Amino acid sequence: MRKIPNNKAWWLVLPMFLFVAFSAIIPLMTVVNYSLQDIFDQNTAYFVGVEWYQETLRNTRLHDSLLRQFGFSFSVLLIEIPLGIAVALMMPTRGWQASAVLILLALPLLIPWNVVGTIWQVFARGDIGLFGWTLNNLGLDYNYTANPLDAWLTVLLMDVWHWTSLVALLCYSGLRAIPDAYYQAAKIDRASRWAVFRYIQLPRLKNVLVIGVLLRFMDSFMIYTEPFVLTGGGPGTSTTFLSQTLTQMAIGQFDIGPAAAFSLVYFLIVLLVSWLFFTTITHMDKSDGGGKDVK
Amino acid sequence: MATITLKGLAHSYSAKPRDPLQHPDDYAIQALNHVWKQGGAYALLGPSGCGKSTLLNIISGLITPSAGEVLFDEKVVNELSPQQRNIAQVFQFPVVYDAMTVAENLAFPLKNIKMPKAQINIKVQEIAELLELTDSLNKKAKNLSADEKQKVSMARGLVREDVSAILFDEPLTVIDPNLKWKLRRKLKQIHEQLNLTMLYVTHDQLEAATFADEIALMYQGKIVQFGTPQALFEQPNHTFVGYFIGSPGMNFIPITRRQDAVFYQDVQVAISHEQQLALQLCQSANLKLGIRPEFIELTHSPVPNSYPAQVKSTQHLGSYQLVTLDFAGLEMHVRVSEKMQFDGNRVFLLFPRLWLKLYVDEYLVGEPPAQKAGDSHA
């Protein structure tokens, strides 16, 4: 059969091409464009090559911010993932209690970021906030506006309050997907509660946990609104995370060029960490399946 | 190892079951009394939905019965969890712990009872050899075929020797016929070696008969007959047993009584003296005669006490032929030798006395006393 060359079909690709171009490629390229220039005003810009990138990588303010950011994100994961699993394991599985708990857990997820920041800003105050007032009356010298450690812990606590529900809900759905037969078999095999968790529940939670870890890592790595409202990044720079540093640079100081270079580095870091994590997990899966080819 | 006794057991899946006498449909198990002796190989046979699996799960403790008691030896175990009852159970569909290798799967029940490692290894090897799993010991369980998964499931059930009993819930459903036969033999062997109480649930009479010394036939939440495969075949206690066991099942002839004789339509059917006595003792109009296709004799010419019938069709099934007859409007099946020839349509039926059974309200009556031995229901 002779092939009839007809290139009209390319037009069908056009809508998708335009969509991707406007939603991702053009904005991203704008940032790339900025990152290579020194911009003074609308009409004055000079091409500077990779200078901004070099500066970004040498900037100690950014280094501090990055370290703080990693510390924060890992603390978030270390607390929220185990806590989320624990909450999911304790949740009732049927009846009105199950629905009630689901709604309660979903509530923090529905609150806008800046409102969460405001809630905690008031809640943690020493004079009128229940949390801060209680701590002070218990004899603890707690003041998140003055003490860097207090501020850091408060931001962490706020994030845990806001987002543990997400991990818990993901794990809850994962747990509900385990057929009863597995629990029955485990009972028959005289498995302890721990063995049931370790060998039946945990392996089957793996997929939802991968999603949970990725989401929580990316979100916490890009956290902006909540600490901005709660502490404004202070005291000092103790709770100034990457995104806030970036905003200060781009909007506060109007350093568009360095900010663009920094954005791209930031983006690459998130991408790199997520990719490393995901590849490691999928690779582990593959080596599990090694037996398949032996047949 | 234990003798398992069931006392007045009843179970309903509905939250508020009504009175069992007026609403038997609410119950999956009804007023069941039974003893499974230590060391026996038993089959629990019955159609789908008759309560077999429910009964098994009650024994293992996965389900708490609505009423009645389960005893292991002399001890009531109603309140004990499956873990405490120390029972092994193999489910209908394979359950393997897919994050573990086959060897780890087999070791799991032993690890849970804190058996020393060296001993676990020996035991795992032993059971893997028995079920021909040695080659796949290091494979991840999730990569196995359905057959192999079920073997792993089964091996996990057999790996502990100290269990009170091993319960099988149609374990061979997903296994292909060839292997099925082999595994059944294996189970039988294991039973002989280990002297364990084994209870095997199935809806397949052949499977039940090859595995078990004694079969309990369940119907509508009750055990209608408990006995050897032979007893179930020759002396069905209940019309359902007659219908369910054998292939095809028993022929039933609805009859009416006129004075001392019984008639099917206008044909008088001769019955034994015992059966006549039994009939005098009851009022019921629900009367049936039953006879197995294997026991009916056919002749080409009339002899005393024979009944005319029309041949409708014959089916050649290798070593025998199955003849479908029309006996005064009633369809009957007869199993005869392959050699028998049918020239015309007309044949005569002979019902040997010994094999013609009388059922009143679906239950067997009027048997000579000696023959009742060996069946526990009456």
Image (cartoon, coloured by chain):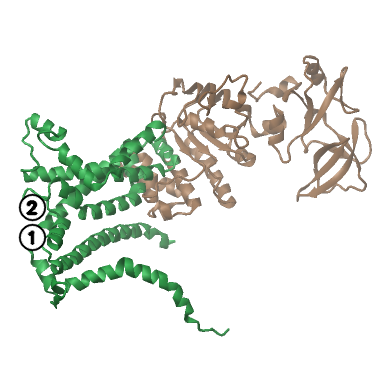
Chain colours: A green, B brown
Q: Residue at x 38, y 35 (%)?
A: A98
Q: What percent of the width, then of the height, locates residue B197?
A: 50, 32
Give the class, few, some or many, for how many residues have Cα within 10 Å of label 1's Cα (few <14, many ≥20).
Answer: few
Q: Residue at x 37, y 54 (%)?
A: B138
Q: Quadrant of the N terminus of chain A?
A: bottom right
Q: Residue furthest top?
A: B281
The image quadrant of residue B88 is top left
Q: What percent of the width, then of the height, locates residue A99?
A: 38, 35
Depth check: B374 or A206 in front? A206
Q: What percent of the width, then of the height, locates residue B336?
A: 81, 43
Kind of residue at disc 1: Arg
Residue designated by label 2: A237
User: Considering only vertical position in the picture, is B51 above or below B117?
Assistant: above
Determine the secondary structure under disc 1. helix
The Cα atoms of the two marked residues, 2 and 1, are separated by: 9 Å
Q: What percent of the width, then of the height, locates residue B191?
A: 51, 38
Q: Residue at x 29, y 44 (%)?
A: A109
Q: In this view of the protein, can residue A92 be seen by the observer?
A: no
Q: The disc numbered 2 marks a residue on which chain?
A: A
Depth check: B29 or B227 in front? B29
Q: The disc numbered 1 marks a residue on which chain?
A: A
Q: Earlier in the sequence, mark 2 or mark 1?
A: 1
Kind of residue at disc 2: Thr
The image quadrant of residue A158 is top left
Residue B288 located left or right of residue B345: left
Residue A81 located left or right of residue B267: left
Q: Are marks 2 and 1 in contact (CB under 8 Å)?
A: yes
Residue A250 located left or right of residue B2: left
Residue designated by label 1: A61
